[in-house]
Amino acid sequence: MAASTRPQVISLYRMMLKESSKFPSYNYRTYALRRVRDAFRANRKVEDPKVVEKLLVEGGQMLALIQRQVSIGKMYEAQRMVVE
Amino acid sequence: MLSPGKTVSSRLLRPALWLPFRLCPARTAVSFMQKELIKKRELEKDELRPLYMDFQATTPMDPRVLDAMLPYQVNYYGNPHSRTHAYGWESETAMETARKQVASLIGADPREIIFTSGATESNNMAIKGVARFYQAKKRHVITTQTEHKCVLDSCRILEAEGFTVTYLPVQKNGLLDLKLLEASIRPETSLVSVMTINNEIGVKQPIKEIGQICRSKGVFFHTDAAQAVGKIPISVSEWKGLSYVPLVGQRSTDPKAWVLCMCNADLDFFGSPAAEPGGGQERGLRSGTVPPPAGCWGWELHGAMIIRECPCWTNRLWPKKIMDEIPDVVMNFGDPKKRKTLMRVCLYGFSACTSASLEPSYVLRAIGADEDLAHSSIRKGIDLKSIKGTQH
């Protein structure tokens, strides 16, 4: 990760985790958290600033998607699952 | 300790039935009793929801798929077959992009993809279509005893129309004997239908080899890949000889009820008896409006996702853990590592389509399972969202 974009990446990571943890559905929530962590870990070693920029844009879109889906999930909330 | 044939669940399910099933005097009365034991009931408001493990019946839709589809449900509602206005064009673009994406997912040509309403429709179309199209010269169809009901029923209909159908038995491990298949192909055989992954017992048939045999003998080959999508990589170009592959999205994060059927481009059925009569959409094979939001965008996104996430989430260690920790569990056959999509505790019970009937599964009887086991079996399916761990 290039030094200049590091704070941006970390902030995006934190935001995505925070938003993912708001999914009311247990399955979606755990999956989203797992997927976000894995994606950031998989791209940890990326150095090329262009690629980092592209990934940041993709991450931003994904963050917006998570936010939308969390609000939809909240509209139709169901009972909690036995494992929660 | 109970013997393997007498599992705890079988006792719970059939409390009054200690006699072997065939000796039981009133079979229907017992079925009725079993039905009474499984009562339909809605959850209370503050009651906890049970865990979902029926991923072979359908999967929860992925939020990303829903997100891609919503705009088409809200604003872009044109009929993709309307060629005269912008609403139609934007829907058509969505549909065609989806078609391309799906084609690349299975290594096919976009022109070979046909969207249908479900695997049942696709199977019906393929089997009856091919058989009837070539009926003047070829009147023999081969399938296996463990196929899905929609394949078996289509074959029954063909039999009633005067075709000969060979229902090949499977071996104890659920696999088809290739030599037997080769021996059964006659000069008048028009079609061989073998499913890729069995919906009840999860075995993966040697599709590539079967495809080679069919190709060398000049026979059409149809495989029902409904349970395979998103669980094993599918490549039509690698599996030579395939003519038809229905794939189902609802089994892998997509909305229910839109499916595509891949039809080999050399087979042109236009105007053949295979056609669903109507407006002639989908090359005339399947008339009826294709819904771009419900099916196609879902498929497109799902395609992109599956390429990224399919590989290694399937072989997690559930079967071993269950076998180790719960007594009286019988793993039916084969090596759990080789099983691709289904993991079974004890034996499988009912697939969604046949779960209304209380007869033991015909698939289990075909592999020679005990009636007791066949009655007490459970099918457990997993998916991306039901596993714990870091792999996808």
Image (cartoon, helix red, strand yellow):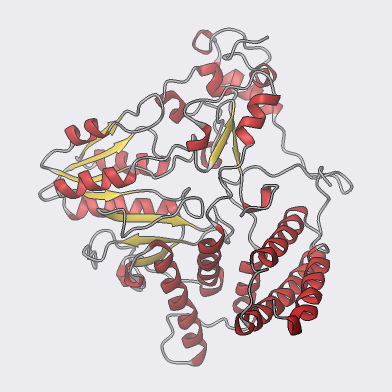
Q: Quadrant of residue A76?
A: bottom right
Asked if residue B222 is positioned above or below residue A39 in the image, the reply reads: above
Lateral position of residue B281 relative to residue B355, left or right: left
Write the residue at 63% across / 60% down.
B61
The image shows residue B194 at horizontal and vertical percentages of 33, 42
Q: Is residue A6 visible?
A: yes
Q: Is residue B289 visible?
A: no
Query: Residue B287 at what x, y percent from top left?
Result: 37, 68
In the depicted structure, whether residue B112 falls above or below residue A83: below
Image: B246 above or below B70: above
* Residue that appears at 14% across and 46% down: B217
Residue B32 x %, y %:
62, 24
Left/right of residue B282 with respect to residue B374 in the rendered view: left
Residue at the spot 65% in from the left edge and 55% down from the top edge? B60
Q: Quadrant of residue A52?
A: bottom right
* Camera-side residue of B182 and B292: B182
